[in-house]
């Protein structure tokens, strides 16, 4: 089943007089269950692509379909709902809300979905235990290491059982060992739960684990290989 | 150098500094308007009191002020006039006869103070001649002018007759008929209800005073001469007379103004504290944001004293900038208002009761100006002390570790 | 909802110092407003009680037209009907029929203008405090005849002793002159300079005879159990008395100057406090915008994971409300304590300042009030202005786009 489809996806940033073409007519299809790594040097358009797929940014031209829905037609609040239900996000840093405990951070999307407290409790603990960070539940972000914080971020991204998780340089601020552990974890989730991952990274450890590797250069797809 | 550094620092976070500056601007301009209006109102009350009746200086037979009986008449008015003519600072003077009495119309009666005046000379002393709203000013024999309020109470109009009833110099009841020839309206409603004017000769006749007078009212060339002229006259005319300034006669408004001046700083302080919280807040924020920077400055050898002074200076500058803009805005509002006045018509009756008149002309005194200039910069300085102490408490190494 | 409140609560304590300073500012404004309003409203109530109590009454019955033409011709007969009406109303605490006359009073040597309060001691003693303000001699009683009580300044000016006779000259109801001799039996110090200079208390019957105004009164001053009864009783009496050519006026209609002076003072007080609250609102605006802009990255991420803008804005609004409410509650409490203390221990002014008060007929003391209105109005105004001040930052959050937030530096 095709989960994501882009048609002639183009993004031009204009900063006064200078125009930067961040993405040039990208056509891409991603199937459900894939573990995609989008690689490329900085400025190649990785993050732009991810933001457009996640509906955080609007394309200059072209379309993004998520599960067949043209997301450009969604209103702001509908898009927020759509992200809440269908998409999990993991960012480089500042992923977690500092005043909330790990448990509450993971619980947040479920609260926004209006799920009952007992159900929330069950699902949060399930995910935390799955990621083996159950003991972090009552800790606040500043009491956790960077790797632990990113694990909580993964937990938050998958707790709603989204169709897809978008991760933007998730290992950027981690040492290589912790980074490797994080990417293994994401792969495990992909396998165990069938969650589709699209990860932007130029970290070789991440690229190495890709199920499908899309290389971007200057806003176009330079290479697209499926390994499994 | 330190000025430039401080100036640049305060504009690093424009929004934050601007909000505090605006709060200072608002308080300075609002205080300027409130204070000048209150001052103006009280000055008007004082001026009206002088201009309506009291004048700058009054001379009576000793004891008259405490016991306003006709028996305290001035026996020797020529001698006093001679003295007055020789004093340069005196601009005008006028002779008066004053007595309590009862005024009766066909409909009603009222207790009044009867003032017998020399019509032409009195014109220079008080504003009554200029406050006539109906009819004309006194001049003719047995013509009387009343306040409009009193005329309403007595139910009389121009041309109607009224009877003045007094007890004369010998204690006998004496009365005479007068014709209402004019109505006046002064800024003070209480005054209008009580004071009636007749020519001095009519008054002397009614009261059996012959050619004697009760008081002299003096206007000087400048209010500042009051005390010296008072002394001069007192020495010249001797002990059997009392020479009183308007303040001796009616100190209430002066007391009111003093009370106001003694208490107004509280209002400045209240606004100052409200603004001060904002100053402390942004200076603290700015210090915490710059901990690392202070570490660097200290590491390259900047002394704690200097950093402390820098923070105080930054805050002081905010206070000064806000005060200057606030003063400019306040003055731009004040200047036209001081010409046109502010019409507080909805409180007309109350203001007439106070005797200030319904149109208030704000007055900016040096006292107000100095309070306005110093309050906010001073508060800013005080408000920066705690943040400045915080700024020097960090050790260089520790500060550098701080992100 | 519970979660959002918890979230907001934790957010405001992220920067403890800043939040505390802001709460302190709100507290300062609140307690100051409560104290100042307390002094104002307390004084007004006190002024009105004293003045209305002794002089005009909470309401006053007059003949129509008396207000504009207060002459003997506009007096009216104090009939049994009116008496029954007043006696039967349960809100009426006391009342006093009074006849006024402007006269000339003379000791033989000196004469002054006087204002006679013709009062019936039986009613007056129950109604006013005048009999408690005797400084020499005694007040009138029901058997008084040919006796008067003078204001102390008038007494001094006339150089009299208790027991001396004064000659009073007046104008009777027919317009003719009348005079009579009266014995001074007492001296009263009302503390109202203007009246102390001219007041003469005389038995109502004596004055009616003196002026040939049999059974006539100028006004009936009526004391009610409470201010809030005024409208009801006024309406009730008006319905019955208007057809008889009488009118019922509230104290504020009788003493327009006092009413306006209170309004004037009230308006200037409110204006001052409004600016004070606005100044504090600038502080709130600064704190909220600082805390909002610091969190733009975080907000961006929250938006990205599906937090809706309006909910985020709501959280920020909650933060403002919590800060404001904490400040308001503590401020109201502290202000209330001060007011309570002042009520128990009124501040008595002394020296020259006292004379300013006395000139207007008030005892020179500062009183306060714990009227719930003060607290409700203060709390609501501060909360309202706090919310207004937070509008801009809250709007910025409402309009924030996730990417702009994530990338905000």
Image (tube, rainbow, N blue to C red):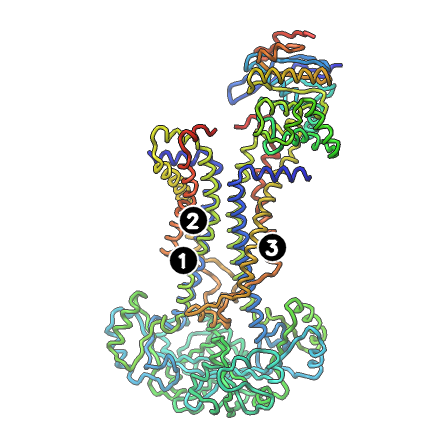
- Looking at the image, which residue is at 62% across and 88% down? C214
**Quadrant in which the C terminus of chain A appears:** top right
**Residue B187 rendering spot, x and y as whole percentages:** 46, 68
CB atoms of marks 1 and 3 within 8 Å: no
Q: Is residue B51 left or right of residue B180?
A: left
Q: Is residue B78 left or right of residue C86?
A: left
Q: Is residue B13 visible?
A: yes
Are dots 1 and 3 on a single chain? no
- Mark 2 surroundings within 10 Å by alpha-carbon count, few (fewer than 14), some (14 through 19), many (20 or more): few
- Mark 3 surroundings within 10 Å by alpha-carbon count, few (fewer than 14), some (14 through 19), many (20 or more): some
Are dots 3 and 2 on a single chain? no
Q: Which residue is mark 3?
A: C377
Between B173 and B199, the one nearer to me in the picture: B173
Q: Chain of mark 2?
A: B
Q: CA distance from mark 1 to mark 3?
A: 33 Å
Q: Which residue is mark 2?
A: B332
Residue A71: image quadrant is top right
Q: Which residue is mark 1?
A: B363
Res. C162 mark? none
**Residue C404 rendering spot, x and y as whole percentages:** 58, 27
Figure check: B108 above or below A58? below
- Looking at the image, which residue is at 65% across and 84% down? C77
- Label 3 residue SS: helix
**Residue B303 rendering spot, x and y as whole percentages:** 34, 34
């Amino acid at each position: 089943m095709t989960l994501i489809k882009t048609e002639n996806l183009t993004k031009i940033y204009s900063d006064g007089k200078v125009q930067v073409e961040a993405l040039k007519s990208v056509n891409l299809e991603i199937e459900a269950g894939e573990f995609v790594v989008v690689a490329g040097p900085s400025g190649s358009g990785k993050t732009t692509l991810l933001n457009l797929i996640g509906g955080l940014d609007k394309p200059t031209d072209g379309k993004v379909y998520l599960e067949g829905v043209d997301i450009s037609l969604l209103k702001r609040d509908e898009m927020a709902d759509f992200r809440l239900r269908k998409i999990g996000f993991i960012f480089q840093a500042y992923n977690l809300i500092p005043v909330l405990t790990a448990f509450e951070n993971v619980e947040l999307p479920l609260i926004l979905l209006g799920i009952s407290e007992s159900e929330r409790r069950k699902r949060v603990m399930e995910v935390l235990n799955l990621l083996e960070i159950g003991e972090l539940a009552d800790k606040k972000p500043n009491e956790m290491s960077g790797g632990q914080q990113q694990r909580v971020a993964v937990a938050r991204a998958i707790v709603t059982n989204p169709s897809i998780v978008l991760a933007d340089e998730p290992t950027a601020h981690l040492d290589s060992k912790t980074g490797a552990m994080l990417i293994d974890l994401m792969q495990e989730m992909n396998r165990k739960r069938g969650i589709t991952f699209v990860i932007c990274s130029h970290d070789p450890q991440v690229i190495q684990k890709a199920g499908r590797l899309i290389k971007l250069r200057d806003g176009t797809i330079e290479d697209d290989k499926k390994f499994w | 150098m330190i000025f430039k550094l401080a100036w640049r620092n305060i504009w690093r976070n424009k929004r934050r500094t601007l909000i505090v500056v605006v709060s200072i601007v608002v308080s300075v301009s609002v205080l300027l308007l409130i204070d000048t209006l209150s001052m103006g109102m009280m000055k008007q009350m004082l001026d009206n009191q002088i201009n309506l009746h009291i004048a700058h200086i009054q001379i009576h037979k000793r004891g008259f002020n405490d016991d306003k009986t006709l028996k305290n008449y001035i026996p020797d008015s020529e001698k006093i006039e001679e003295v007055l003519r020789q004093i340069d600072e005196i601009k005008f003077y006028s002779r008066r006869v004053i007595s309590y009495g009862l005024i009766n119309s066909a409909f009603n009666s009222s207790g009044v103070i009867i003032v017998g005046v020399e019509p032409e000379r009195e014109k220079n002393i008080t504003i009554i001649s200029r406050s006539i709203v109906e009819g004309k000013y006194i001049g003719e024999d047995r013509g009387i002018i009343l306040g409009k309020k009193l005329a309403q109470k007595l139910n009389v109009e121009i041309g109607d007759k009224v009877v003045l009833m007094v007890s004369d110099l010998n204690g006998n009841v004496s009365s005479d008929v007068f014709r209402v020839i004019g109505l006046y309206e002064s800024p003070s409603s209480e005054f209008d209800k009580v004071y009636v004017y007749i020519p001095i000769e009519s008054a002397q006749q009614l009261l059996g005073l012959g050619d004697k007078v009760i008081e002299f009212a003096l206007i000087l060339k400048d209010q500042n001469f009051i005390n010296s002229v008072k002394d001069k006259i007192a020495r010249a005319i001797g002990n059997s007379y009392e020479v009183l300034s308007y303040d001796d006669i009616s100190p209430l408004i002066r007391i009111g103004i003093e009370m106001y001046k003694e208490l107004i700083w509280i209002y400045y302080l209240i606004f100052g504290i409200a603004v001060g919280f904002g100053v402390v807040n942004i200076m603290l924020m700015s210090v915490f944001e710059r901990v690392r920077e202070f570490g660097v400055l200290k590491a390259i050898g900047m002394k704690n004293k200097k950093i402390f002074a820098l923070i105080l200076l930054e805050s002081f500058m905010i206070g000064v900038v806000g005060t200057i803009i606030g003063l400019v805005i306040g003055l731009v509002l004040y200047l036209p208002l001081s010409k046109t006045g502010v019409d507080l018509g909805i409180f007309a009756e109350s203001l007439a009761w106070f005797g200030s008149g319904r149109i208030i002309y704000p007055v900016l005194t040096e006292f107000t100006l100095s309070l306005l200039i110093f309050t906010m910069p001073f508060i800013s300085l005080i408000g920066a002390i705690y943040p400045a102490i915080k700024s020097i408490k960090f050790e260089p190494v520790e500060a550098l570790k701080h992100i | 909802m519970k979660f959002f409140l918890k979230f907001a609560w934790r957010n405001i304590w992220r920067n403890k110092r800043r939040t505390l300073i802001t709460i302190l500012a709100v507290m300062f404004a609140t307690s100051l407003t409560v104290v100042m309003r307390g002094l104002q409203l307390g004084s007004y109530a006190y002024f009105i009680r004293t003045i209305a109590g002794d002089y005009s009454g909470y309401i006053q019955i007059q003949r129509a037209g008396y207000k504009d033409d207060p002459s003997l011709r506009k007096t009216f007969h104090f009939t049994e009907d009116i008496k029954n009406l007043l006696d039967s109303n349960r809100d009426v605490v006391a009342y006093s029929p009074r006849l006024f006359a402007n006269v000339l009073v003379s000791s033989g040597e000196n004469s002054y203008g006087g204002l006679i309060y013709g009062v019936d001691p039986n009613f007056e003693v129950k109604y006013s405090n005048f009999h408690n303000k005797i400084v020499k001699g005694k007040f009138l009683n029901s058997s008084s005849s040919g006796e008067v009580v003078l204001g102390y300044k008038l007494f001094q000016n006339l150089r009299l002793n208790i027991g001396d006779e004064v000659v009073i000259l007046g104008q009777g109801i027919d317009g003719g002159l009348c005079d009579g001799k009266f014995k001074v039996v007492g001296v009263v110090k009302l503390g109202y300079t203007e009246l102390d200079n001219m007041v003469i208390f005389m038995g109502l019957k004596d004055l009616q005879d003196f002026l040939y105004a049999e059974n006539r009164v100028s006004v009936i001053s009526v004391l009610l159990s409470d201010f809030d009864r005024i409208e009801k009783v006024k309406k009730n009496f008006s319905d019955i008395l208007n057809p008889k050519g009488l009118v019922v006026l509230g104290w504020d209609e009788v003493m327009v100057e006092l009413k306006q002076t209170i309004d004037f003072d009230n308006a200037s007080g409110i204006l001052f406090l409004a600016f004070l609250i606005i100044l504090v609102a600038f502080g709130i605006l600064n704190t909220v915008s600082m805390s909002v802009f610091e969190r733009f990255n975080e907000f961006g991420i929250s938006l990205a994971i599906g937090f809706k803008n309006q909910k985020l804005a709501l959280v920020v609004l909650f933060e403002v409300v919590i800060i404001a409410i904490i400040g308001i509650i503590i401020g109201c409490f502290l202000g209330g304590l001060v007011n309570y203390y002042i009520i128990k221990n009124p501040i008595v002014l002394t020296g020259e300042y006292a004379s300013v008060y006395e000139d207007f007929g008030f005892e020179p003391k500062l009183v306060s009030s714990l009227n719930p209105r003060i607290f409700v109005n203060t709390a609501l105004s501060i909360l309202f202005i706090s919310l207004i001040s937070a509008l801009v930052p809250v709007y910025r959050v409402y309009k924030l786009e996730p990417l702009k937030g994530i990338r905000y530096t």
